[in-house]
Amino acid sequence: MIYTDAGIVIFRQDFREADRVIALYTRDHGRISLRVPGVNRAKGKLKALSEPFVCGEYRIYQRSATTLGTITGGKIQSVFPHLRTQLKRQIIAMHCCELIMRLTPLHQPSEQKYNLLRQLLTELDNSEPTPAFVPAFTLRLMAAAGFGLDHPVLQITPQFWQRMHEDKFSNLIFTEPEDLLSLSKCNEVCRRFLNQYLNFPLQTLKPIGLTEEHLPAQTITQKIPSEDLEHAIRH
């Protein structure tokens, strides 16, 4: 079977002497694993289509009874060039791609997740990242994956919670102490969720989120009640 689908490269690994294996999160087929033949040769024609964060239209050949398809061609839509010029942007993009890789099953399509990842990469490419990018993406991915919380926890205001789930990532700029504290609590929700549902730690660096050194001194002393958070995540 041969089909075409829009996808974003979320993982890449060399395979054998000249091939690559990539994980592609596609609009219509979800997360799929694909072989890209011959790209590590000097005249490899599909190398650009197999680079991390590349978004494109992929032509895929899938034999029956096999899980690993083969990319036979395609067309690049965006390479998000500014991601590749700043380490911080690359780290955030790699981290969010790994979250998609680790929290989404194979062959279960979700256009919502595809659009979420593409939105994150687009805004990350066009604007300076803030400490809210990663927790906002994680909370939205949790909701899309069926793990989202129906109501805000840890005394986070409904307005702040709504902004973290609905505003453009680039608009999530917070300076007020109460907002910074709420952002810290959102980071804690994300950390507890990942610790509970991942079998082994993420390979990417720690999320570029809010850490205690970013908080005003008076807010650091306010402790987050862990038992309340555990109860919220379980239910």
Image: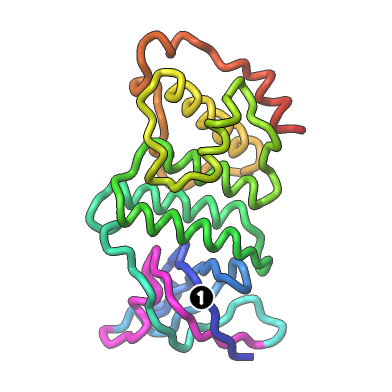
In this picture, is 148 found above or below 16? above
Identity, as a three-letter code, of the amino acid under mark 1:
Ala
In depth, the one of 145 and 35 nearer the eye is 145
In this picture, is 228 found above or below 234? above
Percent of width and height locating residue 69: 57, 81
The residue depicted at 61 percent of the width and 85 percent of the height is: 62
In this picture, is 121 found above or below 37? above
- 64 vs 89, left or right, is right
- 122 vs 200, left or right, is left
Q: Farthest residue in the front direction?
A: 159
In this picture, is 57 found above or below 232? below
**Which residue bears the numbered disc 1?**
6
The residue depicted at 64 percent of the width and 52 percent of the height is: 144
Q: Residues within 10 Å of mark 1 (few under 14, many from 20)?
A: many
- 155 vs 42, left or right, is right
Which quadrant would the N terminus be assigned to in this image?
Answer: bottom right
Q: In which quarter of the image is residue 147?
A: top right
The residue depicted at 48 percent of the width and 72 percent of the height is: 21
Percent of width and height locating residue 219: 43, 13
Question: Is residue 171 shown in magenta?
Answer: no
Percent of width and height locating residue 208: 39, 38
Let me know if residue 206 appears in the view: no
Q: Farthest residue in the bottom direction?
A: 1
The residue depicted at 60 percent of the width and 35 percent of the height is: 195
> Which stretch is magenta?
42-63
Let me know if residue 175 appears in the view: yes
Which color scheme did the rendering employ for the protein?
rainbow
Which quadrant would the C terminus be assigned to in this image?
Answer: top right
The kind of secondary structure element at disc 1 is strand
Q: Quadrant of residue 85?
A: bottom left
